[in-house]
Amino acid sequence: MYEYIQGTLAELNPAEAILEAGGVGYKILISLGTFSQIEHRGGETVKLYLYHLLREDEEALYGFATKEERGLFTLLISVNGVGPGTARMMLSSLSSDELQNAIIGGDVARIKSIKGIGAKTAERIILELRDKIVKGDSKPLAGFTTVKSEVRAEAFNALVLLGFAKPNVEKALDKVLTATPEISLENLIKNCLKIL
């Protein structure tokens, strides 16, 4: 519903920010990662990307300094058993990059070290999100993917549009990227076409 709010940073503490925009003060829940990026900007104009939580018994705005952090938050809350509070705690305990690397690397111990996360939840997060982060094919993570993932996603879309079956495209991409991880988009598509 809301993409972002840009306004004067009126108040700030490690858990929330008050942004004044158009004469209205918005209470926005933030992570420590976002706090550290805006903590020295009191009285200045700040832009926070928003996630609007709306339930029967609750309404809240969660704010993020970057779209990438918001994307990861959105993915985290898509996992059964991970609510907005837990996702914010995770993003406060680890940076977006650290959390992403822990998920990709299957580091259960690192994720489990976060307050409120047990072994089963950590395993579920890894199981459900690893492929989404690695492939970069998830909408919430726009801008969050690595260059390799972006190249892979573009090549995947191009090859599917050319009429090749998705499973065959996946296999071809895996084979080419394993052999040459730093390949350009053009060469990746050409090499896949030779296989397909």
Image: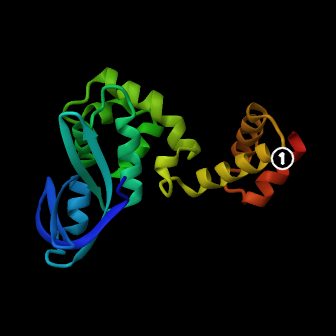
- Quadrant in the rendering for residue 12: bottom left
| Residue corresponding to mark 1 | 162
Q: Quadrant of the C terminus?
A: top right
Local crowd at mark 1 within 10 Å, few (<14), some, or many (≥20)? few
Residue shown at 15%/56% (left/top)?
Answer: 16
* Relative to 92, residue 105 above or below: above
Count of residue discs: 1
The foreground one among 171 and 157 is 157
Q: Residue at x 30, y 31 (%)?
A: 82
Identity of the residue furthest to the top in this view? 120
Q: Is residue 22 above or below residue 82?
A: below
Amino acid tagged 1? Leu
Percent position of residue 86, x then y: 24, 37
User: Residue at (31%, 36%) from the top-left corner?
Assistant: 110
- Looking at the image, which is closer to me, 16 or 90? 16
Answer with left or right where residue 137 lies relative to residue 51.
right
Residue 194 image offset from top left, x and y in percent: 89, 45
Q: Residue furthest bottom?
A: 44
Image coordinates of residue 5 in percent, x first then y, are 29, 65
Q: How is the image coloured?
A: rainbow
Percent coordinates x, y for residue 170 in the rendering:
72, 37
Task: Using the rendered view, name the quadrant where residue 131 is placed.
Answer: top right
Indicate left or right for 106 with 91 as reference.
right
Which residue corresponds to the image point at 36% horizontal and 29% vertical from the top-left? 108
